[in-house]
């Protein structure tokens, strides 16, 4: 938004744990355009300081999405405090700098190498088919060759049939809607806007 960076990358949804609602909220409030998206297979590892045994871990740091994606593994641990933080890389950095010998992070193999941590447990995500979709955002809208998806944020009147009137137009035009997500409007009581994705050429 300040112009410091030309592009930004945000996770928007995960195949195991669903939508990243905080980033939907950012898209509502900030002036940014989605210009690309991609899916990545995500593998989570439990990282700790060298020599730390799994039984010695008392606190685990990570992003709430990563914690959710590893919920079954985490449920098998006892007496461990889960501490959400900004992202998985930050979690690894916090563990590396922590004075707590029982601190660990749910993060990636590359972060283990970057921050001098060891893998206490590998592939701890609930599903092997664990994919996260990331979007690339820019301050100025741009259309690249091969663009085949349209993302919209739509507000409509709070009355019967209002949303149907919008969706029926997509149907009449033969457009496939691949996503429909309702998002509460901050500061208003039970009012919603809708995040819609269409499989369609932008041009």
Image (spheres, rainbow, N blue to C red):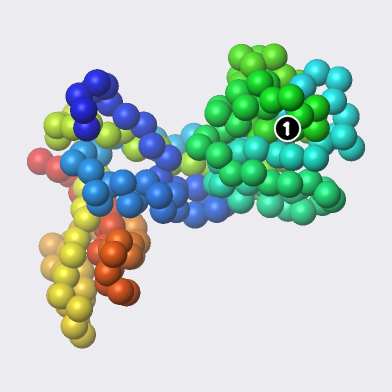
Residue 133, given in percent of the width and then of the height, sits at 43, 41
Q: Residue at x 33, y 65 (%)?
A: 184
49 sits to left or right of 9: right
Q: Residue at x 23, y 43 (%)?
A: 30
Residue occupying the far left of the picture: 203
Q: Residue at x 68, y 33 (%)?
A: 105
Residue 194, given in percent of the width and then of the height, sits at 27, 62
135 sits to left or right of 151: right
Look at the image and tell me in which quarter the N terminus lies: top left
Using the image, determine if residue 157 lies above or below residue 41.
below
Residue 99 appearing in the image: yes
Q: Nearer the viewer, residue 137 or 131?
A: 137
Look at the image and tell me in which quarter the C terminus lies: top left
Residue 198, given in percent of the width and then of the height, sits at 25, 54
Residue 129 appearing in the image: no
Other-residue count near label 1 (Cα within 10 Å), few / some / many at <14 / 14–19 / ≥20: many
User: What is the tally of numbered marks visible in this picture?
Assistant: 1
Residue occupying the far bottom of the picture: 160
82 sits to left or right of 85: right
Residue 60, image quadrant: top right
Where does label 1 land, which residue?
104
Residue 62, given in percent of the width and then of the height, sits at 61, 38
Using the image, determine if residue 91 lies above or below residue 180.
above
């Amino acid at each position: 938004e300040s112009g410091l960076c030309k592009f930004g990358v945000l996770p928007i949804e995960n195949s195991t744990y669903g939508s990243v609602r905080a980033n939907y909220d950012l898209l509502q409030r900030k002036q940014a355009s989605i210009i690309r998206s991609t899916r990545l297979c995500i593998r989570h590892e439990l990282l700790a300081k060298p020599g730390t045994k799994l039984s010695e871990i008392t606190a685990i740091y990570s992003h709430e999405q990563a914690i959710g994606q590893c919920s079954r593994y985490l449920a098998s641990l006892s007496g461990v405090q889960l501490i959400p933080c900004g992202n998985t890389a930050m979690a690894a950095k916090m563990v590396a700098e922590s004075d707590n010998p029982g601190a660990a992070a749910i993060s990636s193999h590359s972060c283990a190498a970057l921050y001098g941590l060891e893998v206490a447990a590998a592939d701890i995500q609930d599903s092997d088919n664990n994919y996260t979709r990331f979007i690339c955002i820019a301050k100025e809208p741009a259309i690249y060759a091969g663009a085949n998806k349209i993302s919209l944020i739509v507000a409509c009147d709070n009355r019967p049939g209002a949303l149907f009137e919008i969706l029926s137009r997509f149907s009449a035009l033969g457009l496939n809607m691949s996503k429909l997500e309702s998002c509460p409007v901050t500061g208003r009581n039970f009012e919603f806007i809708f995040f819609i994705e269409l499989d369609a050429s932008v041009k």
